[in-house]
Image (cartoon, coloured by chain):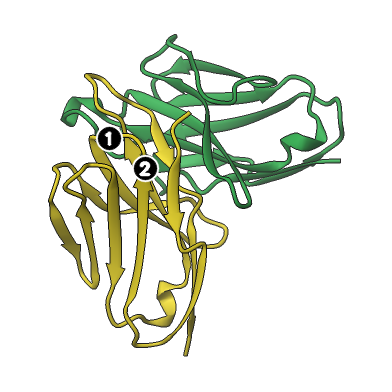
Amino acid sequence: DADVTQTPRNRITKTGKRIMLECSQTKGHDRMYWYRQDPGLGLRLIYYSFDVKDINKGEISDGYSVSRQAQAKFSLSLESAIPNQTALYFCATSDPARGPNQPQHFGDGTRLSIL
Amino acid sequence: GQQLNQSPQSMFIQEGEDVSMNCTSSSIFNTWLWYKQDPGEGPVLLIALYKAGELTSNGRLTAQFGITRKDSFLNISASIPSDVGIYFCAGQLPGAGSYQLTFGKGTKLSVIP
C-alpha cells in the first residue's frame, strides 16, 4: 500500500463546481502539505498543516481551502472551481520528529481538469 | 517568493552517457533535495543534502551541496532508459522549524537507447 494516498487520481468537472481532493497517509507524520504543479512552473505550495487543526497558507492559497481533522488526513477544497485551477495536485508529508529539515514525501497526485 | 534556477530545462542523451544538472539561487538554503518524477506519479526523493560541501551518492547518482549554500548539482553516470523523467531540485531555507520547500522548474531527461 502507498504511504501517501490521494483520491481521486483523476477528476474532470465544470466551472463553478465545488471539488474536494483527499489525502491520507500511513506514515504517522505530523506535517502535511498540498502543492499544485503546472507545466514549466514546478511545484507551488498551496497550504500546509503542522498538526491537527493547524492550517497555514502557502504561496498560492487564493481560491482554495483545506481541512485537517485527523493526523492522517488532509483535504483540499476548491469552493468554486475555475479553469485556471486545472493542474496536477500533490499531497506531501514530513516528519519533524526525526530532526529538522526532513524531506517531504509525495503522493501520486490528482489530475484535475476544469471545463 | 524565493527563486531557484534549474538548468538545463531539458536534455536528450544517449544511453551510457553521463548527465549533469544544477540549481542556483540568490538565497542561502539549509537543505538541498533532489527528486525524480515519473509520468503519472509523484516526485520521489533521490538524495538529501544537509551541509555545505556535502557530496552524497545514491547508486549512479551523485549530488553536492555547494560551498556557498546557494547551489547544488546532480550527476547521473552511465545513463539507462529508466533514468527518463523530470528531475527537480528543492531548497529549504534556514531557520528553526523551517518547513517550506522552494522547487526548481525541473529538468526533463530523455535517454535515447
Q: Colour of chain B?
A: yellow
Colour of the chain lettered A: green
Looking at the image, which residue is at 77% across and 23% down? A18
Which residue is the site of mark 1?
B28
Q: Amino acid at mark 2?
A: Ser
Residue A37: quadrant of the picture: top right
Q: Which residue appears at 41% of the width and 27% of the height?
A: A32
Q: Would residue A54 be found to the left or right of residue A102 on screen?
A: right
Q: Is residue A4 left or right of residue B76?
A: right
Q: Residue at x 36, y 25 (%)?
A: A31
Q: Residues within 10 Å of mark 2 (few under 14, many from 20)?
A: some
Residue B63 x/y as whole percent? 23, 59
Which of the numbered marks, if any, corresponds to residue A71? none
Quick one: B105 or B7, which is closer to the camera?
Answer: B7
Chain letter of disc 2?
Answer: B
If the image is split into quadrants, where does the C terminus of chain A sit? top right
Disc 1 chain ID:
B
Question: Where's residue A89, x and y in %?
Answer: 59, 40
Give percent across and percent down for residue B38.
Answer: 49, 62
A56 above or below B41? above
Please determine whether, in this image, residue A39 is positioned above or below residue A89. Answer: below
Find disc 2 in the rendering and name its residue: B25
Based on the displayed image, in which of its 4 quarters is residue B52 positioned?
A: top left
Whether residue B109 sits left or right of residue A84 in the image: it is left
Q: Are marks 2 and 1 in contact (CB under 8 Å)?
A: yes
| Three-letter residue code for mark 1 | Ile
> What is the CA distance from the residue labelled 2 to the residue labelled 1?
7 Å
Specify whether B39 is left or right of B58: right
What kind of element bears circle 1? loop
Q: Residue at x 36, y 15 (%)?
A: A51
Q: Residue furthest top?
A: A53
Residue A99 position in % (x across, y down): 16, 29
